[in-house]
Image (cartoon, rainbow, N blue to C red):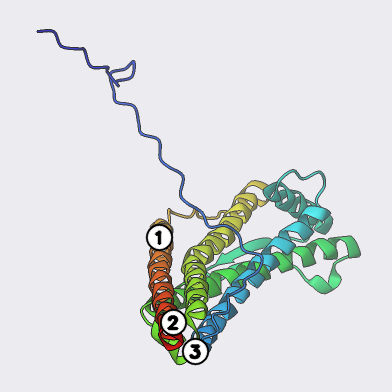
Amino acid sequence: MGCGASKSTETADGTQPKKEKKPKKKSEPLDSIEMKESKIPEIDSFFEKVAEPFKTMIDMRKALQDAVEGLTKLAKTAESPKEALRNCLKDLKEGLGDIGFKLEFSTEGVRFAGIDEETLPGEIKEIYDAFMNLFNGIKTIVTSCPKLVNDFKELVSEAKALKDNIVSAAKNAGLNPMGIAKAGKAVAVNIKTTCKAPLVCKDLLVQGKNTIKDLKDLAKALMGQDVPDDGPDEAEDDGDEKGDAEKGDAEKGEAENGEDKKAETENGGTENGEAEKGEATAES
């Protein structure tokens, strides 16, 4: 009895090939936030509360983006944000001449040390101000996002709990079966949006930290500073996985809300059928 030879997966040196790592799932950038109206007052009020920190996060992202774009405009022939940082830092260093300065890094971000901004000439002051906008944006992100992530996680838990009370809350709000179905759909969309928040916030924090890392690299390369390298941040990986799980739960919640809608629609149809039967009996 013959047996087919199995294909070997070994490489030329006799070792097993390394499995390619799947890229981490990233959140889609948000430029605005809009919660759907369910016409259930207490539920709409809750999602209005969720929208506020969302808007704060979007504003932080835009401030960082605007700061990077400002430096890119001042840079000479920059093809990437990091190259724009390098060119502007180089121009600042050359413009200050013998005035020694350095970049100081802390848990709150980065700042210049050794520069008197009141003595800077116009063109150099413009570059300095652009860097200060960047530093302020980074500081806001690295100091605010960790708390925002925790706040969003609590809001996610509250949002998921709403799906069990949609029908009763909608009836208390005086909605008809069609209104209940629409409310279920609106709440499902809002829950899904809310569940994205922790991941979006973590990605923004990573973006801020990556900008700090770029500045550290430039401080070493251009200014000869002895800047310690950052170690791997395992918490970020865990955060991505949790964010993905939360998004999956949101989709599950949406499906369950769909079942609620179906049930309510069927109930509405039964009620209409009973009414029609009653009318027919009255006529006979």
Q: Is residue 3 above or below residue 230?
A: above
Farthest left residue in view: 1
Kind of element beneath mark 1: helix
Name the residue: 54% across, 75% down.
144
Tell me which label, 2 or 3, sits earlier in the chain.
3
Circle 3: is it few (<14), some (14-19), or many (20+) Cα within 10 Å?
few
Q: Gap between marks 1 and 3, in whole Å?
A: 25 Å
- The answer to whether the residue labelled 1 contacts the one labelled 3, judged by CB atoms less than 8 Å apart, is no
- Which residue is at the far top? 1
Residue denoted by label 3 = 42
Residue at image coords 9%, 8%: 1
Amino acid marked by disc 3 = Glu
- The percent coordinates of residue 55 (x first, y second) are 62, 75
Q: Nearer the viewer, residue 155 or 66?
A: 155
Residue 181 appears at what percent x and percent y? 48, 74
Q: Which numbered mark, 1 or 2, is in the foreground of this view? A: 2
Residue tagged by mark 2? 280
Which amino acid type is marked by label 2?
Ala
At which x and y percent is residue 166? 42, 81
Residue 112 visible to an observer of this rendering: no
Q: What is the distance, in whole Å, between disc 1 and disc 2 at their CAs?
A: 48 Å
**Side of 170 where 134 appears, left or right:** right
For the residue carrying disc 2, how many other residues have a C-alpha within 10 Å: few (<14), some (14-19), or many (20+)? few
Residue topped by disc 1: 248
**Which numbered disc covers residue 138?**
none
